[in-house]
Image (cartoon, coloured by chain):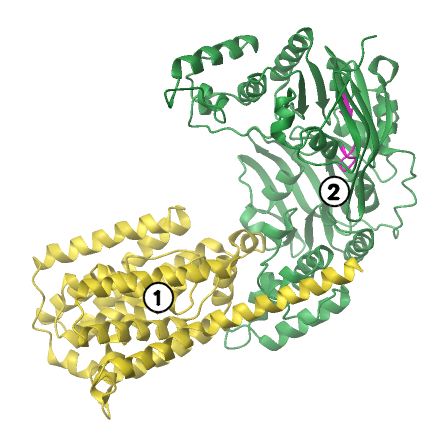
Amino acid sequence: MSVLKSNIDQSVRRQSRLRGDDFLRYLPIIVFVVVLGLLAIFVPNFFTPRNIVNILMQASALGLMAIGLTAVLIGGGIDLSIPSVMAMSAVFGAMIMRDGAHPLVGVLVMLGTAMVAGCINGYAVAYLKMIPFVVTLAMMTIATGTSIWVTNSISVAGIPEAFTNTILTRLWIVPVPVFFVAAVTLVVAFWLKRSVFGRWLYAVGTNERTARVSGIPTARVLFGTYVFSSFFAGMAAILLTARLNSAAATMGNDGVVLDVVSSAVVGGVSIYGGVGSPLGAVLGAIIITMISNSMNMMQVSFFTSLIVKGVVIIAFVALDSLRRR
Amino acid sequence: MAEPFLRMVQISKRYPGVQALDNVNLDAYPGEALALLGANGAGKSTLMNVLGGVVRPDTGQILIGGAPQEIHSPLAAAQHGIAFVHQEMLMLPTLTVAENLFITSFPTRHGFIDRADMLRRSSQVLARLGCHFTPDTRVQQLSTGDRQMIEIGRALLSDPSIIIFDEPTSSLTSRERDRLFGVIRNLKQDGVTIIYISHFLDEPFTICERVTVLRGGTTVGDGAIGELNHDDIVRMMIGSAEVSELAERRETVTGEPVLQVEGLRRTGVLQDITFTLHRGEILGLWGLLGSGRSEVARSLVGLDPIDGGQIQLAVDGVMRPVIPREAQQWIGMITEDRRNEGLLLPMSVRENMSLANLLQLRNRWRLVDGHRETALAQQFVERLHIKVSSILQPVRTLSGGNQQKVVVGRWLERNPPIYIMDEPTRGLDVGAKAEIRDIVYELAANGAAILVIASEIEEMMAFADRFLVMNRGAIVREFGKDVSKDALMAAAAGATGAAMGKAVSA
């Protein structure tokens, strides 16, 4: 009898756990709908085509960085340097274009600068076994310091029109980057689920020791995640530089770090590793952008919005750790 | 003869499915050391947990100084003067000796730590142990033997009348061991009652007056140690069950060498490990806990570092040297820690089984071929009789036996020429054990070379064709298939008694 009972207990528990998992998996979508509903009620003029396009455009750069962070988080690490590396890359690319380089060179400089930073992060974390939080925090201050130093805190203007116009081309009223980010999100989501690297990454993030015993080159995988996140920081740099028609150290300020991390956690990416998808992270980026945008429209101060976002992060991390029980 | 100071009478404890203790009796006398002996799983730990107030017995009585006592908690045990010296040393290396001694009970004065009192009492304890370092030395600067002394010092602080030593010598050098024995002799002179647990069978003869032997949760022998010899104790520990009934196996066909290890070493852990593993062979690496058997296994695939030595592997029929990380390509590794090193618990059976094989499962777009992945998982789930509702079921929800089969199945999918299996049947029930054994036999019959480690001697003897015996980080003996249990036990315990003479050397 007691055996039977414990079996039933177990299966019930299993079911309820599954239900909890499902709930958490769809949570980003639920939050998305709720936020949309609230905005429809409380923020007039929110649902104008102009504002929607504006939000999607803002969310694009954020979404790219959130995808980058997602890969690192799945592997069980963290990369706080993404926004500052993005800003540094943007500054370098913008300066070289201002000084007459071809826009394509500018693009390559941005991607290259970012990936150098990513290689340093990755090497320190994966091979020197340093703590990701410390390494990327240091990289954040280095990148920010460098940007401020080379620009004297003045934003870099004089970006060639060929660069901005190409990138900001519109299809109907929607700028190309929005489609681009949507496509990249789908491709990366598929790639993480189906490529060997992606499968290794989820394994390493779930249990690094099991991965190692199973013959997975864990250090190479972890190194890869930081290069990946920086590559996405580089792409975000291209997009933002075009949108702002300038580049500055402040592009990657603390507020942006907060936004990137919130996007990922609101999108259901676990900060404990092994769980998450770029689809969720990009949805998270859209939610965070909507929150910022609407608070902006309601003329809530920037600082108040920081408080709101901080609370959102804590709430979602709390949910994340509940799921792990 | 004095009265026993400590009596444990008719102690029984049942866990679901196991009678851990069955009317066990234990008498210990003041000023004497009692050796508590038994193989793994004999019930020594459970019995000591009962004494320590960690485990509540179902029935039975404990008498201390002739008076029955209830020991409901570790705190109660301490109040009755019972102290433990543990095998693994729980130290905070960056703190001082005095701080480590008093970590749970800092003496205070006006709410602050009374350093003067702490240092004074630490010095007293250290003097009693014959230690020459000062109480403000940092623990990280001390040797293993000195740390062991601090562990004992911690026990002495409460001025206990009963001290339990749980395998205190497993990581000590022989000089440190002699020093420890000196301390135990002094404690005996002070009238302390000692219970001494060890896997090294020569030690009780040196330091103990009496012995109690457990097997399968019952007391199978006790008495004055002078009336017993080494063989008697080994016989009591392993019982009379014939090994032959356990080992039923096909004729072994041992082929050419596939793995040659030469002079593998790591300071303080492994010394000069040299052996050869052949095609179709199941080689048993036998030794007690802490003998270095798992460390050998882990070093071969780069999970533990090594300081020197060479590993050669047969690659396409030619022996060539490899570094351990590379060796992993040809070796299927099953570690003893299934939950933390074997499985991705939240993931599905399918994902766990394909884990080592993803590169081989790539299709022409270099993506993981989902159909083949599913088909292979399905195939091995059936072949290994893994009980699952679906291959998408998370492995967390499987029983231990089925989880272990998933780990085995992972490597069967990969099909490496060499397997290393550390405790492949640990924690499994009899049926699951037999199934895993059959799989291993079949692998060997199909030409795989297998290095296996098991801590239960019957299990080991059922598995292996040949045995390497390890003791304190070195391979000390090699035996063939027809070795006796006694000889294996004796060699692992590092004894040089009569049992060794009877051993059949290969």
Q: Colour of chain A?
A: yellow
Q: Quadrant of residue B229?
A: top right
Front-lying residue, B473 or A317: A317
| Overall secondary structure of the magenta section | loop
- Any magenta on residue B370? no
Name the residue located 43 percent from the left edge and 74 percent from the top edge.
A189
Question: What residue would you read off at disc 1?
Answer: A68
The x and y percentages for residue B106 are 45, 22
The x and y percentages for residue B360 are 59, 67
Q: As shown in the figure, which amino acid type bears the numbered disc 2?
A: Ala
The residue marked by circle 1 belongs to what chain? Answer: A
Q: Colour of chain B?
A: green
The x and y percentages for residue A172 are 24, 93
Relative placement, left or right, of A91 versus B390 is: left
Which quadrant does the C terminus of chain B fall into?
A: top right
Question: What residue would you read off at disc 2?
Answer: B454
